[in-house]
Image (cartoon, rainbow, N blue to C red):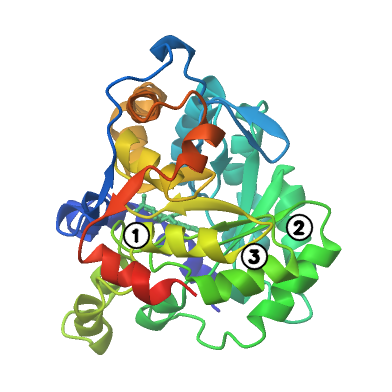
Amino acid sequence: MDKELTEPRKLDHIRIALEEIVDMSKEERWFDSVELLHNPLPDSSFDEVDLTTEFLGHKVSAPILIEGMTGGHKAAKRINEELAKAASRFGVPIGVGSQRAALEKGELAHTYRVVREIADNVPVIANLGISHVLGSNGVDNAKRAVDMIEADAIAIHLNPLQEVIQPEGDRDLRDGLISIRDLVRELDVPVIVKEVGSGIGPGVAKLLDYVGVYAIDVAGSGGTSWALIEGERAPDRSKERTASNVYKKWGIPTPAAILSVSEAIERAKLIGSGGVRNGLDAAKCIALGADMAGAARPFLKAAVEGKHEAVVSLLNDYSYQLKIAVFLSGAKSIPQFRKMKNYLLLEPLASWVRRLLI
Ligand SMILES: Cc1cc2nc3c(=O)[nH]c(=O)nc-3n(C[C@H](O)[C@H](O)[C@H](O)COP(=O)(O)O)c2cc1C
């Protein structure tokens, strides 16, 4: 792919992602089809409810992850700085966006590395797309991405919908599973596999679990729509633009992905993301079987509009609201809350789950 295209593309993504129209959570709230059951007599003290969670060998303050989004440009560096300050202050893990730009142009590495430099007390996650780790350079690319930011883990994103709507997208995705297996074998850090908004279902999750990934981040539908983001970049009346609207809701709804994947896997940790828009959504992720809940666009918006203070404030909101759900379920800790499976499912989500459970 042409090097010149990567940088402006990352800026386009940020600009378009800030527009409400690409956030499906405005029109399709899958988390509203999950209810948590109320316990009016919790045998606990709210102040003692413990949200701390073990993730990538760290004890983090809450099971919340700032999902990988950006890097590769000086404006992106400023966003990464604000996100990293907030992650460090609050004590939650943080990912960077795809590091492809810096693999192509080494002088951009600092726009990602800033996250490691600032967030030195929390797990930092490197990021590459599956197409950058296919073939004979795959392991080397991944090693360079990890070393570039001294990452605690690397997330490999699966984004076939985005690639086919993106006019310059990588469309030959053969041998992806083998490449992931090789990364698990060859890298010194754990491998996370994530989608970007269309979800990972139980069949693929089982394969990923089998090859030994550390975590699966379902990144399901119901949040940021990559079909719409790429569609906005495509020329008016192009086939890509038309298809982007047709496919804007494509994918496995996040809560259905979490529940079905949690039943299918044995070893990997599970991250629920895609449309997690408040702490109650995060609580629903955990109740359905996730170890962590992640969000992207809400943190991006906060960072751009109100710097790290706004991101910290949003993290505070998420964590306070999550704590309320744990307390009102009668649990005292995240592992206990997760084990309770304190949810019920409404239609149309329940049909999704019936179909997905294998
Ligand atoms: C502006 C923006 C840029 C993103 N860039 C990346 C990326 O480079 N790599 C990646 O794995 N995911 C990327 N994502 C996807 C998110 O990590 C996440 O999986 C997805 O957006 C779902 O979260 P949300 O609904 O809370 O936004 C990006 C998301 C946004 C909003």
Residue under the point 68% across and 72% down: 133
First of labels 1, 3 by sequence position:
1
Instruction: From the viewer's perspective, tell me whether residue 278 is left or right of residue 293.
Output: left
Circle 1/circle 3 CB separation < 8 Å = no
Q: Which residue is mark 1?
A: 12
Looking at this view, is 21 or 287 the one in front? 287
Asked if residue 356 is positioned above or below residue 188 in the image, the reply reads: below
Where is residue 169 shown, x and y percent of the image? 46, 80
Looking at this view, is 166 or 292 the one in front? 292
Q: Quadrant of residue 268?
A: bottom right
Name the residue type under label 2: Arg
Where is residue 105 shown, x and y percent of the image? 64, 60
First of labels 1, 2 by sequence position:
1
Neighbor class of circle 2 (other Cα within 10 Å; few <14, some 14-19, many 20+) is some
Q: Quadrant of residue 47?
A: top left
Where is residue 68 shown, x and y percent of the image? 51, 50
Name the disc covering residue 104, or none: 3
Residue mark closest to the camera, 2 vs 3: 2
Describe the element under mark 3 as helix, strand or loop: helix
Q: Which residue is mark 2?
A: 144
Describe the element under mark 2 as helix, strand or loop: helix
